[in-house]
Image (cartoon, rainbow, N blue to C red):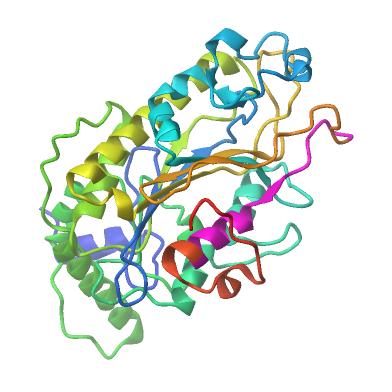
């Protein structure tokens, strides 16, 4: 049986946020759900879905009317008759069929050419740029959500500012100034938290910090306790389980300000067709179940789902039936208040850079500004270090 000392040691070995102790559990999935209170505009929920490894945008939103696409990809291009048409020039990968209903209901925004100036093709550096909303030559310690929550705090009554599902990497919630919990299995977190008991704060600063962490764990555990019995069937597998955990967190009345979920495996240097088809199917089915669960609890109109990744893939296929690290890519925004449609611009495949990549059409910080300014009513300039133009997919 774990005693109090061992319990605290197990948490002390983990990276700590400002007031909550992140847990590193499994699976390899992360979702960011930002639920907000009426007092600070945080009653609405943001669900960030990271497509880890860099999803290929060209085979996600297929430019099936562009002959240059098929010339660049003679083996891995999606055949025209398999594409799910959105317009007379572009359509979705067939594995994304579960999302087509959102398009027809005008609740799916497809963001084309999302990237940033002077792109970096390192997984580690590029995701750091996305997570901190930095410039390519700028190194920041705080995530963009952390800076937003510092400038406009999430109410202390919330169970936490944010929850990371399935990873110890806090990403957009990194840095001091936010209450973040990282977990993959809510039940395991609650079981561990039951072993902690708040105590009188000691005079020793180091011990006082540990006891403060313990008290915060107890508070968060108490707030997160309880489960909703959803009629929605969540998909089998790690991503489906993570979506189910995210839905439990959103359903809890205690509230959180951020949860991130990650679907891993998109670094498709070889054998991309089969791998991406499977992953996009997991994504589409997971997001569909998220929608169904939110409708059950009457939260769909208060939910915004946003995908992101460190980069896309090169337009030209490689020799291994895959694609190498690229720049701008395609991402999705969906929710009950999203104005659907195509945003940005399709890549000009006839005018690629010297290294074979298209220019970006949308700065990813414009997407973040849309979330901050129009979803939460938070001044995006403090979080993003400048003024960026919100997109019209949110009124």
Residue 218 in the magenta stretch? The answer is: no
> Residue 383, percent across and down?
56, 70
Identity of the residue drawn at 65% across and 48% down: 126
> Residue 72, percent across and down?
77, 17
For residue 302, above or below residue 311: below
Identity of the residue drawn at 35% across and 73% down: 154
Identity of the residue drawn at 29% across and 72% down: 38
For residue 348, above or below residue 276: below
Q: For residue 110, say whether it is visible.
A: no
> Residue 207, percent across and down?
29, 80
Q: Is residue 340 left or right of residue 159?
A: right
Q: Is residue 83 left or right of residue 152?
A: right
Q: Is residue 19 left or right of residue 77?
A: left
Observer-nearest residue: 393 or 54?
393
Residue 359 in the magenta stretch? The answer is: yes
For residue 133, which quarter of the picture? bottom right
For residue 41, which quarter of the picture? bottom left
In this figure, what is the number of numbered marks?
Answer: 0
Residues drawn in magenta: 354-373
> Residue 141, percent across and down?
58, 67
Observer-nearest residue: 75 or 62?
62
């Amino acid at each position: 049986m774990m005693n109090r000392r061992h319990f605290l040691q197990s948490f002390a070995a983990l990276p700590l946020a400002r007031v909550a102790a992140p847990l590193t559990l499994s699976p390899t999935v992360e979702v960011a759900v930002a639920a907000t209170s009426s007092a600070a505009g945080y009653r609405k929920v943001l669900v960030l879905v990271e497509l880890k490894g860099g999803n290929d945008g060209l085979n996600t939103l297929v430019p099936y009317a562009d002959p240059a696409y098929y010339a660049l990809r003679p083996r891995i291009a999606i055949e025209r008759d398999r594409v799910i048409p959105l317009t007379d020039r572009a359509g979705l990968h067939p594995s994304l069929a579960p999302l087509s209903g959102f398009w027809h209901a005008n609740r799916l925004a497809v963001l084309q050419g999302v990237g940033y100036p002077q792109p970096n093709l390192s997984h580690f550096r590029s995701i750091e740029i996305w997570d901190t909303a930095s410039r390519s030559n700028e190194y920041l310690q705080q995530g963009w959500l952390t800076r937003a929550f510092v400038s406009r705090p999430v109410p202390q009554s919330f169970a936490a500012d944010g929850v990371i599902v399935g990873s110890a990497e806090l990403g957009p919630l990194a840095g001091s100034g936010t209450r973040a919990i990282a977990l993959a299995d809510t039940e395991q977190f609650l079981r561990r938290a039951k072993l902690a008991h708040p105590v009188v704060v000691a005079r020793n600063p180091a011990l006082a910090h540990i006891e403060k962490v313990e008290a915060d764990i107890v508070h968060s555990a108490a707030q997160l306790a309880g489960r909703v019995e959803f009629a929605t069937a969540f998909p089998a597998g790690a991503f489906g389980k993570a979506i189910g955990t995210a839905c439990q967190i959103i359903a809890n009345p205690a509230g959180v300000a951020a949860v991130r979920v990650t679907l891993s495996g998109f670094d498709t240097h070889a054998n991309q067709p089969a791998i991406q088809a499977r992953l996009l199917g997991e994504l589409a089915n997971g997001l569909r179940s998220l929608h169904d669960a939110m409708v059950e609890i009457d939260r769909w109109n208060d939910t915004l789902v946003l995908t992101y990744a460190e980069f896309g893939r090169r337009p030209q296929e490689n020799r291994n039936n895959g694609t190498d690290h690229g720049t701008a890519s395609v991402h999705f925004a969906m929710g009950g208040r999203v104005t659907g449609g195509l945003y940005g611009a399709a890549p000009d495949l006839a005018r690629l850079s010297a290294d074979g990549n298209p220019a970006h059409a949308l700065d990813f910080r414009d997407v973040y500004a849309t979330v901050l300014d129009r979803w939460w009513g938070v001044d995006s300039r403090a979080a993003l270090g400048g003024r960026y133009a919100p997109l019209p997919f949110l009124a």
